[in-house]
Image (cartoon, rainbow, N blue to C red):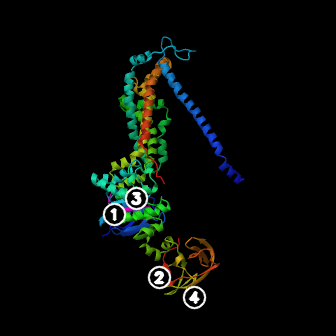
Amino acid sequence: MTALRSIDVSKVFEDGFTALADINLSVDPGEFVTLLGPSGCGKTTLLKIFAGFYAPTTGRVEQNGADVTSAPPEKRDTAMCFQSYALFPHLTVAENIEFGPKQNRVDRDERLDRLNELLRQVDLERHREKLPNKLSGGQQQRVALARALAMRPSVVLFDEPLSNLDAKLREQVRREIRGLQRKFGFTAIYVTHDQSEALAMSDRVVVMSGGKVEQIGAPEEVYQRPETAFVADFIGSANLLPFDRVDDHVVETPLGRLTVSNRPDPNARFICWRPEDAEFGVSEGGNIVTSDISERAYQGAYTDLHISVAGAPDQRLHWPGGASCVGQSATFRLPPERIRFVRGEIA
Amino acid sequence: MVSLADSGATVAPKKPTRRAGALNRFLMIVLMTIVAIWLIVPFSMAVLWSLVDPETGWNYPDLLPPSLTHLRWVEVWTTTALPQAIANSYMLAPTVAVVTLILASPTAYCFARYDFAGKGLAQLATLLPLVVPGFVLAIFFSSLIFSLGIYSRFLSILMAHCVLFLPYAIRIMTVSFGQVRQDLIDAARDLGASPLAVFRAAYMPALLPGILASLIIVFIQSIEEFAIAFIVGAPNFTTIPSILYSYLGYNFIRPNAAVVSLILVVPNVLLMLGLERLLKSANPAQTGVKG
C-alpha cells in the first residue's frame, strides 16, 4: 500500500497558469521523497495539493488507499513544516507544540508526554516558555518540526524548511530531520531547490521542471543516470554535447569520435558527461581528448577547468590537482561507460 | 575625489556624534516642552474657567481668577439636562463604536485579502463620508430618516454616526487584516484547527490592536459629534456636545462651557490612556522571524 499517491494530478490556476500537468507519484510508507526543481517548477504546488491547501484541477490524491482529494488540510493525516516556520508569535514554544494535539482533543497526559519527548528530541527543553521571536532561526525551525510531529502524522510535508538558515546550520538541521524521520518512521515529502540537500537526504528524488516530472529515482540514479538534459544540468554540473550516431558503440561529437558502452537511445538528443568523469594521465587508446584551457578556477579539492571546442563551448572538467600544475592544454580520457545519452532540450 | 569623500564619511562621524547627541537631547526637551504647554495651557484654562466665581469674574489684568468656586459645576449639573445627556452620550458612543467595527470588518477583510476589479474605486468611495460636511449630511440625513419612518432618535443618530465614522474603522481594519499572515492561517488549519480556532490563533493577535484603535477613535468621534446629534436628536435627545454648544453663540457663557467641555474631555483622555496601555500589552510578539 502506498502512503500517499497522486494520480494524473494537474493544477491550472485562475489566471490560466498551468502549474502542474499529469503528475503521477507514489510514495511508500516511511519513505523520504524529495521534490527537486527550480522555482516555478510546481513542486510547492504539488506539496500544497498533498496538504490539502489546493484542490487539483484534475486527478486524484490518495492517502493509504483512501481518496482524500477533496479533504481539507484540517482533516488530513499530514503535517506541514513551512518555509517561514509559521510559528504563532503570541504563543510560547510549548504552546506552539501543543497547538495541534489541543485542536484534536488529545488528552492532557498524552499531550504533555508528547511535548516533553519532542522538546528533548529537538533539544529545546530550556526554551519551552519562550516566545518564538526570542529564538534563533535554527531553533525556530526545530520548534516548527516538533509542532508538526506532535500531531503524530503519518506524512510530514516539508516546504523548503532550511532555506532561511545559513549553510552550516542547514547541514545540522538536515541531519536532525533525517534522524527524527528514522526514529518516528513518518513518510516525508520534502520540497527543495537545493540539489545537494536532495541528494543527501532522500530515498528517492523527483526532479521537476515546468510543472512536469523529469525523472524519479534514487539519488545515485538521478545523478549518475540522468534521463534528460534538464536533470543532468540541474543536478551537479554536466557537459552536454550534440552527437551523431555512427553505430551502436560509436558516436561523432564536437570532441571527436567517442566510443560509448551504453546504446544510444533513439530519442536521445545529447551525450552527457560530468566534470569528474575525465581521467587524466592517460594518452593511449580511445576517447582521448586534447583541448586548450580557456579558464581555470581553483576549488581546493580540485581545479575547475573550462575548455572550448568548436560546437561545444564551455565544457568543464575537474583536474584533481592545484591550478599551478596545469599547462596550456588538457589531455584527458572519457571512459565509455561514463558517457550517457539524454533526451530533452538544453535550457 | 571619491576616496576623499569616503574617508571623510568613515572617519568624521566620531566626534560630531556626541555633539549631535546633545543637540538631539536639547531639541527633544524643547519640543516636549512646547507640546506640554500646547496641551496643558488650554486644559488648565478650562479648569480655571470652570471654577471662576460669578461674583468676582476673571478680568484683565488678573493672571489668575481672584476667587474660585464650584458653583458653576452645581449650576450646570442642576439646571440643565446634563445628567441625561451624559447617560445618552455614554450609551450612544460605545454602541456606535461596536456597530461600526462590525459593519467595517467584512469590507476591510475584502480590501485587505482579495483583489477584485474596481477595488481602488471602492476604497475611495468608502472615504466619502469624510468629505461631506457634517451639517450638510445631518440636514439631509434627518429628512431621509423621517421619510423612512424611523422615529427613534437613538437609532437615527446611531445609524448616522455609523455611516459617518465607517471610513475610520474601515481604514484601520484594512491595515489590520493586511497584517494577518497567510502562513499562520495555513499552519493552524494544517494542525486541525476549527474555523474559530484559526480565527483565534492566526487572526486575533494581528487584529487586536486595530480593533482597539478603531473602537477608541470611533467612540471619541461619536461622543464629540455635534451636528447630527443636534439636528437629528434635538430637542428630545440631548448629548453632551449639544449642551456644550448651547453655552456658545448668542448665550455665550464661558465658565459653563468650560464645565461641560471638561465633562466631555476628561473621560476621553482617561479612556485613551487606558486603551493605549492595553494596546501595548495586547501583542508583545506581533512581528518577526529572527534570522
Give the percent coordinates (x, y) of residue B83: 38, 22
User: Would residue B171 be seen by someone viewing this image from the given angle?
Assistant: yes
Q: Assess disc 3: are there few (<14), some (14-19) or many (≥20) residues with their C-alpha within 10 Å of its C-alpha.
A: many
Res B176 → quadrant: top left
- Amino acid type indicated by mark 4: Glu
Q: Which residues are magenta?
A: A151-160
Which of the numbered marks, if any, corresponds to residue A184?
Answer: 1
Q: Residue at x 50, y 36 (%)?
A: B131
Answer left or right for A32 relative to B36: left
Q: Residue at x 62, y 41 (%)?
A: B18
2 or 3: tag closer to the N-terminus: 3
| Labels 2 & 3 near each other (Cβ < 8 A) | no
Answer left or right for B187 relative to B121: left
2 or 1: tag closer to the N-terminus: 1
Answer left or right for A294 relative to B285: right
Q: Assess disc 1: are there few (<14), some (14-19) or many (≥20) residues with their C-alpha within 10 Å of its C-alpha.
A: few
Total number of numbered labels? 4
Which chain is disc 2 placed on? A
| Labels 3 & 4 near each other (Cβ < 8 A) | no
Which of the numbered marks, if any, corresponds to residue A81?
Answer: 3
Task: Please identify, in this view, whether the residue under mark 2 or under mark 4 is nearer the observer.
Answer: 4
Examine the structure image and report whether residue A165 is included in the region drawn in magenta: no
Task: Please say if A301 is above or below B29.
Answer: below
- Amino acid type indicated by mark 1: Phe
Instruction: State the residue in front, A192 or B246.
Output: A192
4 or 1: tag closer to the N-terminus: 1
Q: Would you name the residue on which mark 2 appears?
A: A266
- Amino acid type indicated by mark 3: Cys
Give the percent coordinates (x, y) of residue A164: 48, 58
| Same chain for the residues under marks 2 and 3 in the image | yes
Q: Secondary structure at mark 3?
A: strand
Q: Would you name the residue on which mark 4 appears?
A: A284
